[in-house]
Image: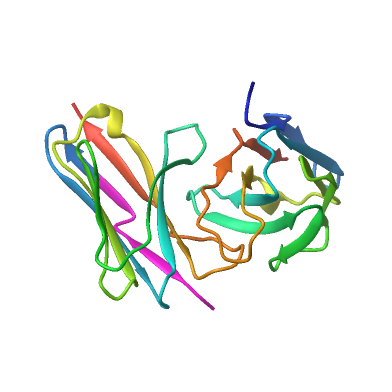
């Protein structure tokens, strides 16, 4: 009965490969996020979807492409992986669909991506 | 762009000592949240502050929101080894975007 789940938990791959990370939430939330956490623990927002619609797209290389097939899922596809993509990627969800919201974010367990 | 600065970056304490982390925003916030991330874990929500000057307590943790709603602090009294982790503040100005501080990593020596 995990609230926000991510697969895989660990991903080790070679430079230049293409990989995907999947996220699912069973909380009925309307808004989902992808964050990147680097080795210094800094959490940087990448994307946000609200009811399958992209609402936040930070300055992220276009090698990163999010996809939300429905509001319970938000996947992240990364093309041509680079060494600097190594990080922990967290998915998160939030109930609010209102523009102004004080809702809590619920984070997934994270996917540790290592690019060799 | 909007920034939330958090200090210190690291703090080493002896078990039983107090600990405080501070956040400052370049703009007025509608609310601020605090999260804790244990080593190897994911951020977990602790509390939310909404009102100017608000103070909330959770056992040994005390959270404050400044009068101008631009700064906040988390104070832990008599730290324990279970307090180890990274503490993040997260500011909102409205909308969907959350601006996280850089986090303060707390190390507690038994």
Q: Quadrant of the C terminus of chain A?
A: top right
Residue A9: within the magenta? no
The image shows residue A62 at horizontal and vertical percentages of 82, 63
Q: Is residue A94 above or below residue A9?
A: below
The image shows residue A77 at horizontal and vertical percentages of 83, 47
Lateral position of residue A82 relative to residue A92, left or right: right
The stretch in magenta equals B1-11
Q: Is residue B88 above or below residue B83?
A: below
Image quarter for residue B5?
bottom left
Image quarter for residue B26?
bottom left
Give the residue displayed 55% in from the left and 60% down from the top: A101
Q: Nearer the viewer, residue A6 or A77?
A: A6
Lateral position of residue B22 relative to residue B37, left or right: left
Lateral position of residue B49 relative to residue A109, left or right: left
The image shows residue A42 at horizontal and vertical percentages of 50, 54
Identity of the residue furthest to the top in this view: A1
Give the residue displayed 66% in from the left and 46% down from the top: A86
Q: Nearer the viewer, residue A53 or A67?
A: A53
Q: Quadrant of the N terminus of chain A?
A: top right
Q: Is residue A34 above or below residue B81?
A: below
Q: How many marks?
A: 0
Q: Nearer the viewer, residue B108 or A23?
A: A23
Give the residue displayed 77% in from the left and 63% down from the top: A61
Q: How is the image coloured?
A: rainbow
The image shows residue A30 at horizontal and vertical percentages of 70, 49
Give the residue displayed 19% in from the left and 35% down from the top: B79
Residue B5: within the magenta? yes
């Amino acid at each position: 009965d995990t609230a926000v789940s991510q697969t895989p938990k660990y991903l080790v791959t070679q430079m230049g490969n293409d990989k995907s990370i999947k996220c699912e939430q069973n909380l009925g939330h309307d808004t989902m996020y992808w964050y990147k956490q680097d080795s210094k623990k800094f959490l940087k927002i990448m994307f946000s979807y609200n009811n399958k619609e992209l609402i936040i797209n930070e300055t992220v290389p276009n090698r990163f492409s999010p996809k939300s097939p429905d509001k319970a899922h938000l996947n992240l596809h990364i093309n041509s992986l680079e060494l600097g993509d190594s990080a922990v990627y967290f998915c998160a969800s939030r109930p609010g669909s209102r523009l102004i919201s004080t809702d809590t974010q619920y984070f997934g367990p994270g996917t540790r991506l290592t690019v060799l | 762009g909007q920034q939330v600065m958090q200090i210190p970056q690291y703090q080493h304490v002896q078990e039983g000592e107090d600990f405080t982390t501070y956040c400052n925003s370049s703009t007025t916030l509608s609310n601020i949240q605090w999260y804790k991330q244990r080593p190897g874990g994911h951020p977990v929500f602790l509390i939310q502050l909404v009102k100017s000057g608000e103070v909330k307590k959770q056992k040994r943790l005390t959270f404050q929101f400044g009068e101008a709603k631009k700064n906040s602090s988390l104070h832990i009294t008599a730290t324990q080894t279970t307090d180890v982790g990274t503490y993040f503040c997260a500011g909102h100005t409205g909308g969907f975007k959350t601006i996280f501080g850089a986090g303060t990593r707390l190390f507690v020596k038994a």
